[in-house]
Image: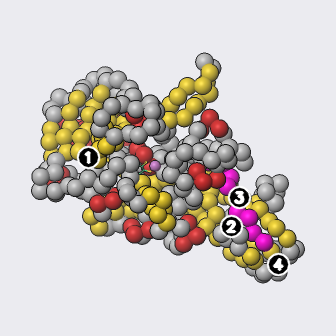
Amino acid sequence: MITRERQPPNLEMPFHTLDGAITPTENFYVRCHFPIPQINPDSWSLRIEGAVDQPAQFSLTDLKRFPRETMMATLECAGNGRIFLAPKVKGVQWELGAVGNCEWTGIRLSHLLEEAGIRSGAREVILEGADKGTIAELPRPTGEIHFARSVPIAKAMDDVLLALEMNGRPLTPAHGYPLRAIVPGWYGMASVKWLQRIVVTDEPFHGYYQTIDYAYWRRDKSGPVLVPLAQMSPKAQIARPQSNETIPVGTKYLVKGAAWGGEGGISKVEVSFDRGSSWEEASFNSPSVRHSWRLWSFTWHPTKPGNYTLLARATDCRGQTQPLDRNTDHGTYRIDHCLPVEVQVH
Ligand SMILES: Nc1nc2c(c(=O)[nH]1)N[C@H]1C(S)=C(S)[C@@H](COP(=O)(O)O)O[C@H]1N2
Ligand SMILES: [Mo]
């Protein structure tokens, strides 16, 4: 793992080590805003409150009576690829490895919400983590805050999972032990770790991590509006070759990577060897699973020596294709344009 920050731990997978559709837990990136909270599983509980008929509290044993489910889902940090932005911007300088795909096992958030009984008029569900700390940069609230994000009721009732396990083992402390949310298809910040409280609200939540932080400018008729980051954009990344590799002329070279995001899954990946002037279609090496990445590859026959800029781009089932150029309205997040891999053929 590449250490981007030691305390709190912020680690990324060296993306060139991509090998298989499932990211082993020890290679799964770690993104923490605050120190990992010390949680005693025996005294831990999850509270549900707000616009519900029956506020409730669940211990780990209480959660055992709900049916378990396993789903595969890709998490990508909204700042993944930030190191490629020019000019440089603040924030963790992720390269390509703040993304991973694994199997999450737990219970549906909808089961807990149904039991608590959502009041009519409820709009959002706030997920709060047990981690807390102070924010250094202005603007900021005074004192300690918890990491928290909200999802609309429809998403909460549809497919949000409260995960106890990752890749068949209890969550590790860094990944949210004992319980975390998995919000499939959304950037990682929505998948709140170390869950301790769920608040149903009848108003949109304007917490720190979806206004000052983790928001972007969306253009509409009235002009740019600040909206919380949500769905992951379609994105393909190249794992092989790595930048600055030298490739012998005349060989068959397997270019490979992964693609995820967008609505309804990835339907096409293309590769360019000339900085986007022409594109060739890659083949898929794993099936289309909703909210999970797809591995792809392309056999390249470089016949002329020289410097080459490789790009990859993904298209989702709705026909949305990754752009070539950076959308600066995305600020320091949602780095979904094609990222170059420079190689030398000799
Ligand atoms: N409680 C809490 N949840 C959190 C975070 C956090 O700092 N605290 N980081 C978020 C961000 S920005 C990302 S990208 C994912 C990363 O999950 P991982 O560390 O398991 O890869 O967790 C999200 N959930
Ligand atoms: Mo993130």
Q: CA distance from mark 4 to mark 2?
A: 15 Å
As drawn, 329 above or below 318: above
Residue at x 54% of width, y 72% of height: 17
Mark 4 or 2, nearer chain start: 2
Identify which amino acid the numbered label 4 is placed on: His
Q: Earlier in the sequence, mark 4 or mark 1?
A: 1
Q: Are marks 2 and 3 in contact (CB under 8 Å)?
A: yes
Name the residue nearer the viewer: 5 or 156: 5
Amino acid type at mark 2: Ser
Real-space Cα separation, disc 4 to disc 1, in angstroms: 54 Å
Q: Is residue 119 magenta?
A: no
Residue at image mark 4: 346
Disc 4 crowd, CA 10 A, few/some/many (<14, 14-19, 20+): some
Earlier sequence position, callout 2 versus callout 1: 1
Q: CA distance from mark 3 to mark 4?
A: 19 Å
For the point 82% across and 57% down, which residue is it? 278
The amino acid type of the residue labelled 3 equals: Pro
Q: Is residue 339 magenta?
A: yes
The mark nearer the N terminus, 1 or 3, is 1
Q: Which mark is residue 130?
A: 1
Mark 2 sits on what residue?
Answer: 243
Q: Residue 340 got which mark?
A: 3
Range drawn in magenta? 336-344
Residue 38 image point, x, y percent: 22, 55
Q: Quick check: is the Cβ at mark 1 less than 8 Å away from ligand 1?
A: yes
How much space separates mark 2 and mark 3, taking CA atoms? 8 Å
